[in-house]
Image (cartoon, rainbow, N blue to C red):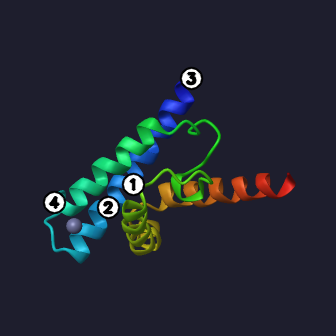
Amino acid sequence: MKNVQTKRDREKRMVSEMIALYCCKQHGSPKGGLCPECEELAAYASQRSDRCPFMETKTFCSSCKVHCYRSDMRDKIRIVMRFSGPRMMFHHPIAAIRHIVSTKAEKRRLQKK
Ligand SMILES: [Zn+2]
């Protein structure tokens, strides 16, 4: 199913951009570069996306009920999301809007059940 692959790629790109933005602003890394800690987090997040068995039905890891992140990584990604989430709206309005729309759709879907 190519749709799942597209979704997976999109999620991975989005997450890595959020980490890059966070690292650049918070850790002073040059644009496009990551400090070792964020590098590890980015690799971990991408690996989780690769292995996520719910890619077909879920919208995004942050709205995924099955929290597959290790707890220390989950804390880190949460901080990154909180920091970069609102800023993504500015840097990548289209991707951010798409994310909001799909998250809302998912919430509606869950409420119906
Ligand atoms: Zn960093």
Q: Identify the mark nearer the N-term, 3 or 4.
A: 3
Percent of width and height locating residue 97: 56, 60
Q: In the image, is the residue at mark 4 within 8 Å of ligand 1 by its beta carbon?
A: yes
Q: Is residue 80 left or right of residue 101?
A: left
Residue that label 1 marks: 15
Secondary structure under the numbered disc 1 in the rendered image = helix
**Foreground mark, 1 or 4?**
4
**Distance of label 2 from label 4 (alpha carbons):** 12 Å
> Decide: marks 2, 1 in contact (CB < 8 A)?
yes
**Distance of label 3 from label 2 (alpha carbons):** 28 Å
Compared with residue 39, is residue 54 higher up or lower down, i.e. above or below?
above
Q: Could you classify mark 1 by the number of other residues whose Cα lies within 10 Å: few (under 14), some (14-19), or many (20 or more)?
A: many
Percent of width and height locating residue 21: 29, 66
Percent of width and height locating residue 2: 53, 25
The circle on residue 1 is 3
Foreground: 98 or 21? 21
Percent of width and height locating residue 10: 45, 43
Compared with residue 110, is residue 88 higher up or lower down, i.e. above or below?
below
**Distance of label 3 from label 4 (alpha carbons):** 34 Å
